[in-house]
Every structure is written in C-alpha cells, then in structure tokens.
C-alpha cells in the first residue's frame, strides 16, 4: 500500500495535470475530457512545467497517475452526461416552457437547451444553471425536505453572447408544493416508491408523491432560470407538469444578482435618519473628549449634546463595582439572574429558529425525548423570571422613594416611556428601512422581508404603544420586534402597598391567589393544555388565551412585589453570624425545596411534552393536572426565585450568591433590555442569510447560540449607545433642572449606575436592582413549542 503522504502529494500535483485541459469561466472550472489516454510523453511534458517537488513525483509514478487521470476524465464525462439527463427529465419542473413564454425568455431557454445537449467551452454556463437546481438527495426519511440548490452559483450566471443568441443573468426562485384542491398536505400514496423509481422522475422533485402527511408545506426546492423569464411563466409550466398529481406550485421568492439595490422611500428615510444620529454621536464624542481639558464645553446647551458621547457612555456601561463594597441595600445577585435568564431566552429561541432549515427534521423526535431537553422546551419560565424581577424592583424602589415623600405616579409613567420607548423606536426604524439593504440576497431573504420588514413598516405603532400582545392576538397579524406585557396592575400594586403593613400583606396574598385562579379557570373553561405542549393541537389557543394575556401572567409579578416588600422591611443582610444551627438547617432545607420546586416546574411536564407523529396520538394531560399545573407553576416558580434572592441578599447564598453577584455580570446586566430587543432580529437575520440546510443536533445549536450571543451583544451595545443611555442621561438632566433628580420613582436604580458616578446612601444601583430589570420586561414570545 502506498505511503499516505505520497498520495497527498500526488493529489496536489494532479491539479497541475488537469490544468492543460481546463478552462476557467466566472470562477467555475470546466474540464473537457481527453479523447486519448495520457501517455508517458505527456506526463514528462507536464512534469516539466511543475514545481520540482511535483515533477519528480510524477516521473516516478507515471503509470499510477495515468490510471488516475483516466478515471478522472471518465468521472467528468459521467457528470456532464448526468446533467444533460437531468435537464431532459426535469426541465418542466424547473423552467418555463419555451413555447409559452415571452420572446426574450424563449430565446434564452433555447440557448440553455443547446448548451446542455451540446456542451463545449463556450456553454459551460448552461451546465451551471442545471447544477444550481435543488435536487432530491439523501435523508428524505429523516425529514430532509429542503433542496435549495446553490443560490450564489445561479446568481453568478451571466450570459451575453451574440453567437449563442442569449443575454441574461441567473434568476434564483424558491418553490413550494401544495394540494391543488384543498391547499392541504397530501396523504401518503400507495405507489409512492414505485413513483420514486420511475425513469421519468430521475432526481425528483416529485417528493410530494410520497411525502408524509402534514409535511408537504415544509417541502421547498430551488430553481435557476433566465432573468428574462417571469414567475408567472414558471408557475404556469410547472403546474401543467404537476396536474396529474393534483398539485400546484407556489413561488415564494425570486432573486437576481444586483450590482446595486434600488433605493426606495423607506431606505432614503433610514439613511437620512441614521446619518443624522451618527453625526450627533460623533459631535458629542468629540466635544466630550475636549471637555476633559476645557470644562466650559460641558456647560450650557452643550451639556444636552454631551449625553450622546460614545466614549463617556461606554465607560458607564462597562464599569465594574466591587459588590463587597456596595451598600447593603444593593441586591447584587440580580445581575447574574438577569443575564442568565436572557441567555435562557435566546437558547429557547435558537433551538426553534432553524428547525425549518434542518436536513434531519425527523431527528427532532429523538433529540427532544431526554428529560434534559425540557430546559429548552420549557424556556418560557425565563420570561416569568423577568416579571418577578420587575415586580420586585418596582416595589423595592417605590417603598424607598415613599420614605422621602417624592413619589409621583405621573412622573413614574413618563419615566417608563422615556426608559423604554427610544430603543424600541430606533430598532423599529432600522428594521423597517436599512435592514432590507443588508439582508437582500439569500435563499431565505424573502422571509426577512415578509416577517420583519413589512411588519415593522405596517405595525410599528404596536410596539410603540406596548400593546403588541393584545393587537397581535385579536388582529391575527405579526408584530415587528416582539411581544410586551404591559403591567397595568402597577396601579393596583401601589394602591395595595399604600395601605398599612398588615393590610398590604393580606391584599397582596389575595391578589396573588386571584391571579393563580384566573389562568386555571381559562384553561379549564376552554379545555387547554397547562403550557405550550409540542404535539398538542390546542397549543395555539393556549398561547392566545393564556400565554399572551397579562391577567394570566400576573402572579410572578405580584410575588416579586411581595418579595420587594419583604426585602425593604428587612434591609440588613449580615445575619449569618447570629443565626442558630436550627436556623441554618432550616435555610438549608429551604434551599433544597427551592431547587426541587424549580426542577418540578421545568421537568414536570416531560411525560406529556413530547413530539409524536401523527399528532393525534399525543399523550393527553389529565384535566386535573392541567388545572393544577397551569394555575400554579408560574407562582411557585416565582416563590422559589423569591427564596433565592432573599437568601443571597441576606448572606445565605454561599457559592450561588458568589456566582450571581460577581461583578463580571454587571455590563451584561445593564444591556439586558437591549439584549431582549435585538436578540430575535439577530436570530431572524442569521436564519434569513442561511444558504444551505444545516444538520440539527445539540452541538450545532450550541455553536449557533454562541454566535447569536456575540452578535446580540454587539447589537445591544450599539442600540444602548444610540438610544438607551443617552435618554437616561437626558432624563436626569431635565429632572435635575426641575429639582426632581430622584426620577419620580426610586426603583430606577439603573439610572444611578449608568449616569451617576458617585455612590449614594440609597444603595447606588450599579445594579442595586439594576433596575433596568424593571422594564415591564416585554413578554418574550418563545417560539419553542408554539
């Protein structure tokens, strides 16, 4: 057996042998097979033109190389013949009919036919057209229903030949089959495998003939046709070819190579708007740098411009504070809870996002079976964590502010609008305008335009009014960024807290009980599952009636309010030295119970939360279990979080508190709101720029999640610098001017960390609640399982 190193050297040198018989056109190497065998004289001649390391090897292994070269030419001949055969067999499923098309299209289709049937060095572009088609490949039984072909190869085709009488560029189109009569998925046919092996069906794409029920909508394939042809002509010819199957085709989108994208009104508006923002940021940064040496620049009207200084704001975002030196009122563990929760949100989304682009969709049946996968399918609990944090910090800050007698409900809501709205408006404006110029050429770019750009242009006011949840449910249309839960119950909470201490606790417990009964009542009345179950056909109704509705999600918020009340009434945290052994043992048992409760919430539905085919065979949840779990699981999750936060804050957290309170979380914690806003657009963008289907498993998902976190982090920093931190700074200046520098509601500790440099007696919020957490944290619609 030959030395492996010799084989590698041979393969390297073999590229030199093929050079004499190859021609390069538009980046594609086309090889015309030799009519005669390679002889020793030719070998010597080729070796003469090679580097010394290759020439000596060629001369020493002439016989073996000649055999290899002959096999290579035979392979090329088979490849060219295969493409020709594919063209003859499948042209009606990929191209318009030359007999029923416009004159230019007819001319170019005939040129493709001549180039395929009589290949030569001047018609290699025709081979590229057929080679870029999406064709039937392995893995159908594993759920491989995407055959995109090669998008860029199609767009690279450019023909301008008077001799061939053709002038066009490649036009890539994505096609999808559907039932002609009912527009529903076709049933499996008895003769499916006979149809597969029929000679006139070489290579597919008659997959619909043996597609499983409910899977036809997932079947997409790509085609390449001349840019002179239209989608209407393509659909007409394919539908005629599919008529005997009672099927028809729809064209999702067609793309052509563009030297420049034509600017439309939204693009021009976006360019003007973001150019203006960029100018403001640059000027503010320059003035900010010079103001260090010329303090007069930071006074007067210029101080309102300095709030946009990039250099100053970056320092505020990435500043670190030693948690051991912070005030005892600072709830440092919230840093880690916030960031880890938003990472959990992103994990759940990413596992759901690329299912449609997986080549092994049926493998999901095996991937989701382990109990550990409930961490993904039940990632919805991360949203309830933010509701809990929101209620905690609203109450904690309000009670501290109430001591000064400065609370104003009007100022509070103005502050909430100033805090949340600028980032939403900036991101919505970008998605509705400039994003289309960035994500414009890929097989799935039409999804970005349809699901993001159009929704942002038409429904931008949904997010701006924080009413996305209700509007999307009742109007049955898509939103731009994501979903928000507007916590109107804040007024109810304030009314409750303003009462006496005993009455406050009693009223809070009553309201918590009410908002545990409400979701259970809805679930019972409509016979819904207790959560989003993968195989349950009622999951959509559950989302619309329970998951998106504030009145069914309020219990974690109210338990957060109760926790804030408890923390405020027990502000001191140095308790451990004075605790008895019985107390420490009770705390230990409390930690065990808290972790068990969390595990029960996440993994409790594992038996039922499985994906099965057909869907009718899903494991139905008993009615009593649905009522109990559906009504209580969010509340007990919040109670467990309450225990964790209180123990960490009072010094009973041990290594868990050390981890959650570590200063490394502080910058990420401050960016959590922008993380939330940008994560879904980033994930949509990455999916929309996918060129080829991917293999779906846990390893690839982890790789994707790491990439998403990186790009989301960058996007969050940019969005925060443009909108979030500048408006926080601006609000502080305005409130100072009106002698209201306490921001109307002391819960907003994040203003202290982002804007104020000094440490104050009120517990400086470099995270103190880092109350950016209190963002009425928009309802995160986790796609997983919905």
Image: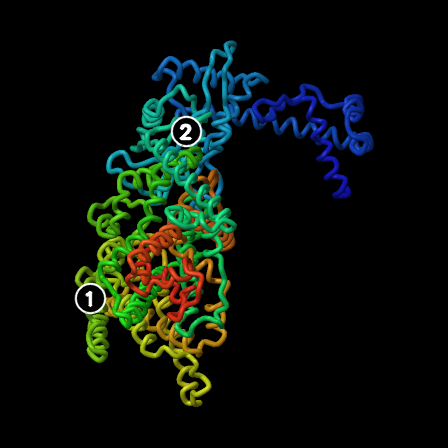
Relative to 137, does residue 734 appear above or below in the rendering? below
Q: Residue furthest left?
A: 525
- The residue under the point 23% across, 50% down is 473
- The residue under the point 42% across, 22% down is 227
Q: Secondary structure at mark 1?
A: helix
Residue assigned mark 1 = 492
In this rendering, does residue 23 appear at all? yes
Relative to 409, does residue 565 appear above or below in the rendering? below
Q: Nearer the viewer, residue 418 or 82?
A: 418
Q: Quadrant of residue 444?
A: top left
Residue 342 percent across, percent down from the top left:
41, 58
Q: Quadrant of residue 752?
A: bottom left
**Type of colouring:** rainbow
Residue 469 percent across, percent down from the top left:
25, 52
Residue 282 percent across, percent down from the top left:
46, 42
Q: Nearer the viewer, mark 1 or mark 2?
A: 1
Give the position of the N terminus as an image quadrant.
top right
**Residue 155 placement, left or right of 100:** right
Relative to 242, does residue 508 appear above or below in the rendering? below
Residue 222 percent across, percent down from the top left:
42, 32
Residue 753's tag is none
Residue assigned mark 2 = 255
Calculate the distance from the C-alpha at mark 1 to the C-alpha at mark 2. 53 Å
In this rendering, does residue 369 appear at all? no
* Mark 2 nearby-residue class (10 Å; few <14, some 14–19, many ≥20): many
- The residue under the point 22% across, 63% down is 489
């Amino acid at each position: 057996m030959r030395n492996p190193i010799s084989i590698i050297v041979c393969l390297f040198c073999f590229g030199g042998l093929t050079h004499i018989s190859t021609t390069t056109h538009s980046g594609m190497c086309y090889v015309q097979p030799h009519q005669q065998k390679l002889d020793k004289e030719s070998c010597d001649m080729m070796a003469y033109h090679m580097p010394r390391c290759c020439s000596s090897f060629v001369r020493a292994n002439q016989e073996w190389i000649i055999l290899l070269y002959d096999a290579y030419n035979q392979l090329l001949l088979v490849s060219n013949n295969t493409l020709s055969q594919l063209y003859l067999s499948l042209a009606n499923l990929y191209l318009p009919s030359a007999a029923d098309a416009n004159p230019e299209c007819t001319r170019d289709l005939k040129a493709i036919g001549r180039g395929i049937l009589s290949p030569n060095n001047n018609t290699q572009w025709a081979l590229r057209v057929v080679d870029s088609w999406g064709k039937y490949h392995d893995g159908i039984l594993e759920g491989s229903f995407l055959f995109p072909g090669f998008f860029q190869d199609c767009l690279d085709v450019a023909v301008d030949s008077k001799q061939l009488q053709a002038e066009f560029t490649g036009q890539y189109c994505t096609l999808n089959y559907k039932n002609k009569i009912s527009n529903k998925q076709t049933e499996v046919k008895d003769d499916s495998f006979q149809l597969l092996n029929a000679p006139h069906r070489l290579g597919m794409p008659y997959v619909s003939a043996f597609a499983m029920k409910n899977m036809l909508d997932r079947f997409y394939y790509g085609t390449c046709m001349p840019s002179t042809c239209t989608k209407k002509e393509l659909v007409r010819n394919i539908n005629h070819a599919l008529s005997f199957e009672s099927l028809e085709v729809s064209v999702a989108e067609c793309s052509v190579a563009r030297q420049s994208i034509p600017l439309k009104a939204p693009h021009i508006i976006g360019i003007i708007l973001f150019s203006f923002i960029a100018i403001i940021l640059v000027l503010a940064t320059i003035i900010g740098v010079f103001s260090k040496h010329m303090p007069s620049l930071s006074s007067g009207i210029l101080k309102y411009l300095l709030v946009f200084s990039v250099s100053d704001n970056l320092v505020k975002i990435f500043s670190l504070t030693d948690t051991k030196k912070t005030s005892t009122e600072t709830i440092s563990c919230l840093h880690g809870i916030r960031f880890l929760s938003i990472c959990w949100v992103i994990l759940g989304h990413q596992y759901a996002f690329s299912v449609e682009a997986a080549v092994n969709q049926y493998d999901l049946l095996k991937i989701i079976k382990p109990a550990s996968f409930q961490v993904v399918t039940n990632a919805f609990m991360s949203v309830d964590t933010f509701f809990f944090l929101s209620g905690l910090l609203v109450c904690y800050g309000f009670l501290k502010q109430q001591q000064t007698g400065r609370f104003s409900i009007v100022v509070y809501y103005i502050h909430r609008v100033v805090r949340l709205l600028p980032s939403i408006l900036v991101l919505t404006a970008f998605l509705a305008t400039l994003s289309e110029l960035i994500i414009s050429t890929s097989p799935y770019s039409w999804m970005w335009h349809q699901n993001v750009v159009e929704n942002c242009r038409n429904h931008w006011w949904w997010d701006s009014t924080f009413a996305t949840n209700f509007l999307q449910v009742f109007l049955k249309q898509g939103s731009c960024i994501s979903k928000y839960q507007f916590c109107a119950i804040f007024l109810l909470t304030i009314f409750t807290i303003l009462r006496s201490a005993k009455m406050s606790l009693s009223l809070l417990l009553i309201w918590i009980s009410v908002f545990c009964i409400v979701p259970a009542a809805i679930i019972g009345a409509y016979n819904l599952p207790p959560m989003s179950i993968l195989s349950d056909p009622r999951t959509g109704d559950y989302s619309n009636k329970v998951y998106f509705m504030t009145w069914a999600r309020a219990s974690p918020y109210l338990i957060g309010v109760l926790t804030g009340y408890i923390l405020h009434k027990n502000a001191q945290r140095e308790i451990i030295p004075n605790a008895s052994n019985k107390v420490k043992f009770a705390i230990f048992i409390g930690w065990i119970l808290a972790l068990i409760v969390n595990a029960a919430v996440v993994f409790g539905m594992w038996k039922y939360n499985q994906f099965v085919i057909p869907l009718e065979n899903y494991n139905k949840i008993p009615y009593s279990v649905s009522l109990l779990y559906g009504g209580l699981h969010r509340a007990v999750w919040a109670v467990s979080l309450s225990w964790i936060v209180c123990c960490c804050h009072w010094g009973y957290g041990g290594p868990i508190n050390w981890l959650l309170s570590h200063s490394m979380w502080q910058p990420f914690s401050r960016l959590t709101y922008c993380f939330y806003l940008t994560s879904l657009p980033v994930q949509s963008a990455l999916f929309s720029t996918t060129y080829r289907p991917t293999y779906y498993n846990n390893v690839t998902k982890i790789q994707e999640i790491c990439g998403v976190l990186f790009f989301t982090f960058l996007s969050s920093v940019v969005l925060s610098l443009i909108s979030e931190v500048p408006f926080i700074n601006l609000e502080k200046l305005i409130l100072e001017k009106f002698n209201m520098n306490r921001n109307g509601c002391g819960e907003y500790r994040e203003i202290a960390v982002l804007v104020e440099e000094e440490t104050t007696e009120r517990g400086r919020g470099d995270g103190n609640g880092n109350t950016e957490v209190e963002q009425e944290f928009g309802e995160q619609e986790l796609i997983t399982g919905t």
